[in-house]
Amino acid sequence: MDRRQFIGGAGAIGLGAATAGASSLALAQAASEISFFYPVAVGGPITKLIDAYAADFQKEASVAVKPIYAGSYQETIVKALTAHKAGNPPVTSVLLSTDMFTLIDEDAIVPIDDFVKTDDDKAWLKSFYPAFMQNSQTGGKTWGVPFQRSTVVLYWNKEAFKEAGLDPEKPPRTWAEQVEFAQKLTKRDASGNVTQWGIQIPSSGFPYWLFQGLTTQADAILMNAAGNEVALDAPGVVEALQYWIDLAQKHKVHPPGVTEWGTTPKDFFERKIAMMWTTTGNLTNVRTNAKFPFGVAMLPSGKKPGSPTGGGNFYIFKKAKPAEQEAAFKFIKWITTPERAAKWGADTGYVAVRPDAWETPAMKDYVAGFPQAAVARDQLKHAVAEFSTHDNQRVTKVFNDALQAAITGAKPPAVALKEAQTEAMRILKDYK
């Protein structure tokens, strides 16, 4: 997942005995073990993939790697920071790209630039999509390396489109079309009870992320690059929130109240909803479990098209030993080669994080057989940085609470957002 598809944990990578080659031997002797926190649940396909990468790295670098898994993204950063404060942090971890400011505030990580020495290193650091680097760089430094990254995309049930008299190959392209299509797709029984909703945009857990698709389309930017100012009550933000609420309250094509992130794909598989917004990280999940033909498209445009990026970055922790940090850098560079980025994208549904990964034979074959995989990549030219600030968890909670208050009808959108703006700027005043 970006957070977002999978719920899960942290791992420790142990780097062991070396036998092949002088440079590999020197590395293994310098750092016989590094710890690696990885956010995915114990068991399941993702852990098998990570285990395989660990084994392959051991073969190539003569460094033994043993992942251990233990919690969600939220649990993983708590464990990583707790370990950092106790003086025994992981050497590296995959954490949310939006955790960058928090990790900087805690003085927990070192810039990736510290390890970039050769021309090859420099070329590697420049190889990632610029949209993903927006949540990886600040203050002229690179703090994270994109790994499992995503955007929000639209999924639709082609059978439901056909039944509603819509062209199953043409998704809605605009906000107005999204409403029009959803009206045709919403089904009610003889008693007036809804048996199929036209659309669902989940609003539990981290509603700000899905909502940021709407704010981007309303041409509103929520925060500055320095992470110390927000614009949560700008006119475009209010307009976007009103549109989201109107889907349920005015147009009655969206389930009322708070809708669950985790069950939205299941609702889609069970034909309770005909269209859904969710992460491209759910692509493999949908491909595996949807028993009907489905489409994937960029999010419909408001004033413009757009989506936030999402997902996880690699970070290197400050209190690790220098040799361990160097070994971690070697592993991060190794796992983000074009070929491995392509394989990871094809195996998981995440967006391969560098353009040259899409030029590999394996990825070209994958896209030829499954064109939906390229949608999130193509949407990157319209993507913005995911909402992230200093003291990110507190600020984000304020924002999420405001969104849910408006969605449930507890407060008018403009009031909820104005209060959130005031409180968020109060929190951020120390970072100005």
Image (cartoon, grey):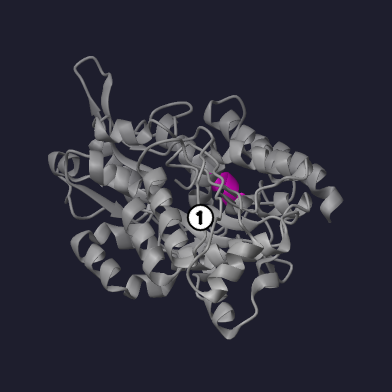
Give x and y (percent) for residue 309: 50, 56
Residue bearing the label numbered 1: 64
Residue 364 included in the magenta stretch of the image: no
Position in image of residue 84 (x %, y %):
74, 45
State the residue lying farthest toward the bottom.
Answer: 119
**For the magenta stretch, what is the residue range?**
235-240
User: Which SS does the magenta portion mostly show?
Assistant: helix
Residue at image coords 77%, 49%: 106
Please tell me how many numbered marks the rendered image carries.
1
Amino acid type assigned to the residue bearing label 1 in the image: Ala
In the image as oriented, which residue stretches furthest toward the right?
Answer: 430
For residue 122, what is the image quadrant?
bottom right
Which residue is at the far front? 19
Residue at position x 32%, y 54% in the image: 347
187 lies left or right of 248: left
* Residue 275 shows in this picture: yes
| Label 1: which secondary element | loop
Instruction: Answer left or right for 31 relative to 248.
Output: right
Res. 421 in view: no
Q: Nearer the viewer, residue 186 or 331?
A: 331
- Residue at (48, 28) in percent of width and height: 258
